[in-house]
């Protein structure tokens, strides 16, 4: 099987989000061929390097989203009219208010109106060899202005000023850059058996066009919902790299990744995702870094916010409508997808896969941790709510005076540094250094450490340092830190946010967020009951090994690939010497995974016009011996 893997700001770039997950998927399916189509987010990402790709990756094609040179295409009068019609329809669908559909002379659903305009622009870009100049033109700004001022437009859209129109036009130009790529011919995405988008939004747009031009089925994986990310992010901002290696907010497309987003989530083309600790390395990978809170964004007007939300909403609805399968990473993301219009029958939940090997020694060894120690491991930032944890620990100390708390992790960016400083001050105020005598040095029961230090050289050692692992977040997506604690066989106390309940099942204690007293009571209950801790830890490890390993993740996607290809095969036509379709040239077994599916000849797509532009693909003519044998038989 030949799979077109579509990424944006991720694999194969070393600093990209979802890179580790995609690399494990590709390496785990060595029996298939992968063609990689990657959109880079920043120049820095382009320069940082790429993963070493396995041999089953047969092609890599990249395109930058952070820059686009003017294509130099000059439209004629007919092309300008086509652009004005299609772009006008697209922006009109964005500006349209709830009652405008009934008032139109030719009523059509907003989704169809947006989709028709999008594919019309794609056809125009293919015919004219470019769309960048037109999207940047004054004609585009004026079309947006007319749509905003039209009867029935959204009230917030009617309030848009010139600066707002320019910001939205710049956003749309960047968002629609994939339409101008030459990836949709028969020797590119038109030749794959299916497209797999590693996230929604821009990564899925080439998959939509491959389906439109060539009928290639699309699988969309979202470990974080792009539309939700945009809502939480707040809109455009300056081009930055908020938090670290995962995401770069990009111009008008920046915006924080949603709190519930894990595994490659960002707003629009910018993922305002925080960075994980570098010492955490391979296990957390990109998915851990994607679970950050919304990144700071420059304040935007209500008009810009409304129009960008409308664009991302229409794009998400079209992606979900055209996808053959949608694979969220957890039930939290699944509910968002269904709310955004995804068909429940197409959805298959596939949990992120994590490498359990680094935690095997700790998980299988007898528990030798200090029975009075609580451990918190993660990225230090406000969303983790360490303030509530410190207040909860103050209550724990009243019940268990010998208890200790170890906070292990690195701050995420400048905001994390400031938050860590605040937490240190609070800990000093709540727990003054306690000395045993007049001449001894005081000791604070709360310590702040980082992975790689003498007390916690590895991530597994950090979890092994305490009897109970605590998660105090107010915002969380897929809690990979919780899964790591489960691999280590640790009893856990967690706040009920994101996918925590789905992950933990009945193998840990869950309390409401921002409730220090409830958190303290749960911690005290486990500290006082070592037998219960042992039972919960063993059950947690068994659950994690069953549900959250790399092997189950790869096996799930393998089954989805086979299901999609069997139900939605690409209909290709092989032509004979006269240019006529050759019957039975693509037998049924060509759709079964195997090396025999790697046909050397080029195909003509039924829907795409690419084959008509070049010489026809010739079928194999019988050799002399075969022809003679057939003649004798007749």
Image (spheres, helix red, strand yellow):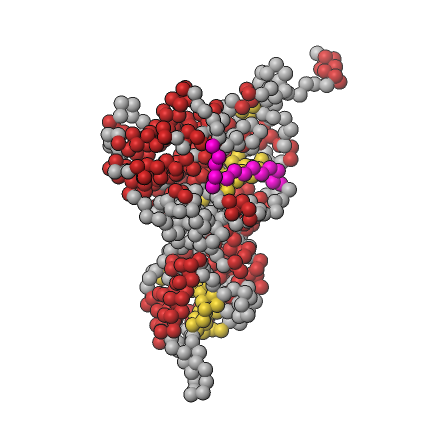
Is the residue 264 above or below the residue 433 in the image? Answer: above
From the viewer's perspective, tell me whether residue 476 is left or right of residue 366: left
Viewer-proximal residue among 347 and 539: 347
Could you tell me which residue is drawn at 40 percent across and 63 percent down?
418
Residue 453 locus on image (x, y percent): 53, 68
Q: Position of residue 412 (x, y in %)?
A: 44, 58
Note whether 528 is above or below 328 in the view shown: below
At 38% from the left edge and 75% from the top edge, which residue is drawn? 431
Residue 588's x, y, as percent? 58, 28
Q: Can residue 449 be seen in this view?
A: yes
Say whether residue 69 is magenta.
yes
What count of labels does the image hold?
0
Q: Residue furthest bottom?
A: 438
Quadrant location, the C terminus: top right
On screen, residue 627 versus residue 350, left or right, reads: right
Q: Is residue 613 above or below residue 155?
A: above
Looking at the image, can residue 469 be seen?
Answer: no
Report the quarter where the N terminus lies: top right
The region drawn magenta spans: 56-70
Q: Quadrant of residue 154?
A: top left
Residue 75 spot, x, y in % from top left? 44, 23
Observer-nearest of 631 and 322 = 322
> Is 297 on the left or on the right of 613, as rendered?
left
Residue ID at (29%, 44%): 301
């Amino acid at each position: 099987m030949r799979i077109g893997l579509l990424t944006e700001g991720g694999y194969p770039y070393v600093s990209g989000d979802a890179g580790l997950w995609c690399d494990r998927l590709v390496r785990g399916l060595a029996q298939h061929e992968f063609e990689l189509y990657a959109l880079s987010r920043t120049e820095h990402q382009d320069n940082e390097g790429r993963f070493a790709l396995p041999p089953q990756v047969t092609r890599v094609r990249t395109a930058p989203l952070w820059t686009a040179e003017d294509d130099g295409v000059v439209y004629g009068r007919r092309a300008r009219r086509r652009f004005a019609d299609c772009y006008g329809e697209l922006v009109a669908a964005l500006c349209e208010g709830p009652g405008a559909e009934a008032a139109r002379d030719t009523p059509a659903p907003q989704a169809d109106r947006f989709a028709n305009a999008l594919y019309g622009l794609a056809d125009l870009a293919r015919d004219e060899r470019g769309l960048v100049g037109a999207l940047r033109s004054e004609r585009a700004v004026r079309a947006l202005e007319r749509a905003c001022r039209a009867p029935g437009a959204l009230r917030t859209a009617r309030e848009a000023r010139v600066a707002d129109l320019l910001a939205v036009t710049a956003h749309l130009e960047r968002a629609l850059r994939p339409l101008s790529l030459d990836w949709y011919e028969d020797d590119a995405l038109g030749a794959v058996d299916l497209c797999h988008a590693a996230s929604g939004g821009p990564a899925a747009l080439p998959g939509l066009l491959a389906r439109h031009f060539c009928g290639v089925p699309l699988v969309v994986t979202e470990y974080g919902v792009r539309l939700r990310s945009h809502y939480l992010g707040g809109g455009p901002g300056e081009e930055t790299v908020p938090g670290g290696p995962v995401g770069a907010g990009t111009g008008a497309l920046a915006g924080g990744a949603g709190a519930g987003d894990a595994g490659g989530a960002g707003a629009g083309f910018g993922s305002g995702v925080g960075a994980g600790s570098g010492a955490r390395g391979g296990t957390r990978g990109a998915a851990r870094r994607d679970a950050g809170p919304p990144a700071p964004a420059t304040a935007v007007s209500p008009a810009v916010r409304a129009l960008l939300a409308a664009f991302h909403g229409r794009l998400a609805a079209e992606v979900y409508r055209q996808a053959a399968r949608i694979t969220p990473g957890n039930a939290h993301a699944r509910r968002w997808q269904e709310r955004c219009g995804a068909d429940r029958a197409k959805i298959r939940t596939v949990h992120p896969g994590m490498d359990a090997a680094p935690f095997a020694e700790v998980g299988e060894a007898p528990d030798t941790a200090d029975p009075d120690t609580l451990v918190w491991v993660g990225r230090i930032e406000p969303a983790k709510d360490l303030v509530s944890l410190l207040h909860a620990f103050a209550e724990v100390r009243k019940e268990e005076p010998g208890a200790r708390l170890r906070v292990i992790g690195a701050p995420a960016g400048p905001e994390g540094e400031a938050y860590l400083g605040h937490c240190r001050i609070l800990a000093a105020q709540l727990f003054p250094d306690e000395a045993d005598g007049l001449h001894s040095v005081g000791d604070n029961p709360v310590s702040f450490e980082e992975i790689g230090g003498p007390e916690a050289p590895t991530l597994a050692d950090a979890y092994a340092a305490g009897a109970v692992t605590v998660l105090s977040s107010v915002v969380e997506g897929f809690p990979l830190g919780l899964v790591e604690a489960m691999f280590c066989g640790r009893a856990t106390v967690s706040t009920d946010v994101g996918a925590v309940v789905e992950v933990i099942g009945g193998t840990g204690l869950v309390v409401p967020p921002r409730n220090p007293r409830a958190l303290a009571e749960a911690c005290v209950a486990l500290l006082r009951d070592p037998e219960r801790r042992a039972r919960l830890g063993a059950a947690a490890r068994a659950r994690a090994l069953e549900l959250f390993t790399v092997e189950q993740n790869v096996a799930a996607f393998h089954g989805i690939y086979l299901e999609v290809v069997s139900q939605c095969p690409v209909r290709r036509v092989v032509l004979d010497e006269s240019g006529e379709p050759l019957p039975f040239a693509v037998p049924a077994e060509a759709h079964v995974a195997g090396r025999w599916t790697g046909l050397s000849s080029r195909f003509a797509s039924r829907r795409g016009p690419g084959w008509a532009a070049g010489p026809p693909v010739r079928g194999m003519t019988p050799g002399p011996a075969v022809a003679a044998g057939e003649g004798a038989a007749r």
